Image (cartoon, rainbow, N blue to C red):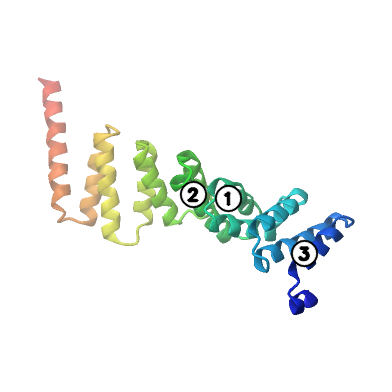
């Protein structure tokens, strides 16, 4: 390394490393290939060769975290989302800490949603995030948007319920309870549930006029139905 740094002969040094790897055991191959790939990327700026050699490493050790992270950087910089996806999946599997795993799964969800058009995979990734951290609000908000776009009303109701339960501000809680009430009435045809939710809204925000009017309307409609049934 020092000689290459002094002389600038990085290409020669890379060739030496690759040559030495041909007679090395697996552990040594991984070390030599990792150094050669790093030289290709950082010193020679030959990213294609760097990627090729990093993939040789994965051929021997599919869970080699340093290599996965290196490929993550290369593929992200090139916006190669199809190629990046399995790398992020592997990184998430071998991540040591849940915080890192959550970050990787959030990135995966965004790629599935925005770049690959794989909505169900995005949903699955966000659900895995909530399995790891049930208070991860960005994951909840991501699921809310996807469920709404996909008209998955029951799932949307459930995630809005979680958002309401974990809201730290009354205004947010009221907003989600109001959305749940509309959903219960219009899409889920659960008028009784809508009435209960509106009553809960008014317990938190008694002066919310829209909730008052909606509750009065639903109660009036329910009374009309009862009267019609008794007639």
Residue at x-position 88% and y-position 57%: 24
Question: Which SS class for mark 3?
Answer: helix
Distance (Cα) linking label 1 and label 2: 9 Å
Q: With 35 as the anchor, is 117 left or right in this view?
A: left
Question: Which SS class for mark 1?
Answer: helix
Q: Quadrant of the N terminus?
A: bottom right
Question: Which SS class for mark 2?
Answer: helix
Q: Is residue 2 above or below residue 25?
A: below
Between 93 and 58, which is closer to the camera in this rendering?
58
How crowded is the residue under tag 2: few (<14 C-alpha within 10 Å), some, or many (20+)?
Answer: many
Residue 52 x/y as whole percent: 70, 52
Residue 134 x/y as whole percent: 48, 53
Q: Which mark is residue 111?
A: 2
Residue highlighted by disc 3: 14
Distance (Cα) linking label 3 and label 2: 34 Å
Residue at x-position 39% and y-position 39%: 155
């Amino acid at each position: 390394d020092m000689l290459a740094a002094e002389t600038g002969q990085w290409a020669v040094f890379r060739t030496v490393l690759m040559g030495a790897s041909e007679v090395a055991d697996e552990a040594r191959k991984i070390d030599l290939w990792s150094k050669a790939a790093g030289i290709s990327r950082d010193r020679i700026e030959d990213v294609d060769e760097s990627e090729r050699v990093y993939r040789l490493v994965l051929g021997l050790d599919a869970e080699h975290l340093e290599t996965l992270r290196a490929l993550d950087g290369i593929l992200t910089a090139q916006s190669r989302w199809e190629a990046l996806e399995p790398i992020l999946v592997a990184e998430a599997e071998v991540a040591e800490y849940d915080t890192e795993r959550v970050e990787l799964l959030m990135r995966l969800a965004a790629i599935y949603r925005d770049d690959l058009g794989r909505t169900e995979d995005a949903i699955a990734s966000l659900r895995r995030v909530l399995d790891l951290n049930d208070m991860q609000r960005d994951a909840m908000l991501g699921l809310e948007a996807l469920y709404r776009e996909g008209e998955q009303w029951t799932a949307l109701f459930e995630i809005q319920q979680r958002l309401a339960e974990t809201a730290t501000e009354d205004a947010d809680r009221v907003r989600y309870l109001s959305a749940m009430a509309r959903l219960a009435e219009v899409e889920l045809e659960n008028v009784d549930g809508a009435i209960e939710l509106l009553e809960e809204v008014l317990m938190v925000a008694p002066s919310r006029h829209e909730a008052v009017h909606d509750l009065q309307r639903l109660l009036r409609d329910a009374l009309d139905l009862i009267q019609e049934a008794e007639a």
